[in-house]
Amino acid sequence: MNDEAHRPEQRAADQQRSAALAVKHAGLSPDDLWVRYFALGGGTNPATVDDYVHGRGALPALERDVLALAVNERLDELTSSYRATYSRPSSAARPRPGLFAALVKLLEGAQSAAPDRLPAVAEAAGRVLGVGLTLYLVDSGRRRLHAVAAGGRRRASLDVDRTVAGRAFREVRALPGDDPESRALWVPLVDGAERLGVLEVEVEHVDDLEDPELHSHCRWFSALLGHLVSLLSQYGDVIDRGRVQVRRSVDAELIRSLLPPSTAGVDGLVVAAALEPRDDVTSDVFDYTLSESTATVIVLDAASQDGCAGPVAAAAVAAYRSARHAGFGLYDQAKLIDETISGRFGGSACATAVLAEFDLVTGRLRYLNAGHPLPLVVCPGKAVDTLDGGRCRPLGLGLGLGEVRIGERALAPEDWVVLYTDGVTTARDAAEVPFGEERLADFLSREVTGAHPVPETVRRLVNAVRDHQHGALRDDVTVLLARRTDPARTTPWNGGAR
């Protein structure tokens, strides 16, 4: 082969032709191709990818390689002999230790390990993969990433908003370090759709940072490790201790133990939520459940004359789950919560709440509002709308003898439903200016047009409210966002969270 074939322009042209041929043999539609490409971390829009495949445009080398990997994975499924070429020598020429062996090593090591041994188990499995690994977990305020290293090795924490590691966490995508000499790849650590932190992956050669096969391996490794972090945290404190920077009160521990994961997604819907307590004493709570065809959510703010609203909120969410498990509809769910609060606490307690039910097939939203701030619907390109139906008295004060009319709204794909407690809009700055409904609507209008994953929008909103009060919350702040998604765009990597 002459030197001409090695010129970058010629190799790029050859790569484009091989990609076009491979796509043809893979039988992938433009949409299917782009979804696979996006799932592997591709960052180019569908039209540009389609133009490249048909010879009408160009892509950067890394994007070409991600596309080639997406096509080749499909060809592997078809056991085809056709392959798309990469812009540089593939790691197949110098095989990387097997992903399967590394995953087995991780599972075997974690099978009977104490939670505090998980970092060492992960590092050992990383060596099988041919890389060094350090685990970083995000703190409860989602502002810093804290290293959880084997042997108790200490490392400086990393700012979520000002570091490459934080950007990988925020955007849910793998990123190389910003130092030209860095051999670190920062990989989001996720459990399903929930973001837990990042992995610092140290490679042997700088060129490996652009290896699409390594990126794919790290995503699979992260998915399993993230699940193990969540699992082992249930029966050990060491992992969770690194994420809790302030001692929790008894009420706060009670509520935290009842909360579901902060993010979850199924075909058709992504739910993300956050609860920031005031002075670590919380009266807020949220909950949800997801199924193949239906999702139900609740956001609740309890109040008690004795100032101890935590047990009221806990009893309310327990009643909600009991009603839900029994198959009750929205009205009967609210009725059981109402009866539980009044029966256990007399007239000294109540709770405002929004209960909602999403039909994932039709997009229909049904909701009930018990004295709570009005939910919002945010549609891309349209004004923020309020949901003012389905109203009744706060729970614990008696729903009354009359039938409560359930509110309804038809949701289109990409519509957002926003539930929040009054700690968001009543938050005041030093001049006593509230955050307010208008500022909230403006924030959401900007966010819905951006590219942030749903949990990142929740994090940014909570931070905006906290910053408005200069870091000192006067009331609990709870936010729950539910976004109707297009199942065709949902990927295992982001859990539909983009």
Image (spheres, helix red, strand yellow):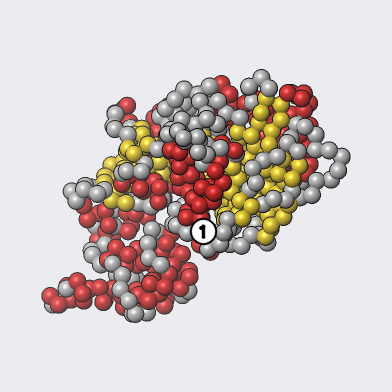
Numbered circles on residues, count = 1
Looking at the image, residue 221 sits to the left or right of residue 364; the answer is left
Vertical placement of 496 versus 57: above or below? above
Q: Name the amino acid type tagged 1.
A: Thr
Residue farthest toward the top in the current orientation of the protein: 306
Q: Secondary structure at mark 1?
A: loop
Measuring 26% from the left and 48% from the top, which residue is drawn there? 177
* Residue 470, quarter of picture: top left
Return the residue at label 1. Answer: 490
Q: Position of residue 91 (x, y in %)?
A: 27, 58
Measuring 74% from the left and 48% from the top, which residue is drawn there? 390
Looking at the image, residue 375 sits to the left or right of residue 188; the answer is right
State which quarter of the image contains the N terminus. bottom left
Q: Position of residue 289 (x, y in %)?
A: 64, 45
Vertical placement of 148 versus 76: above or below? above
User: Residue 380 versus residue 168: which sits nearer the camera?
Assistant: 380
Q: Position of residue 267 (x, y in %)?
A: 58, 57
User: Residue 457 versus residue 180: which sits nearer the camera?
Assistant: 457
Vertical placement of 86 versus 257: above or below? below
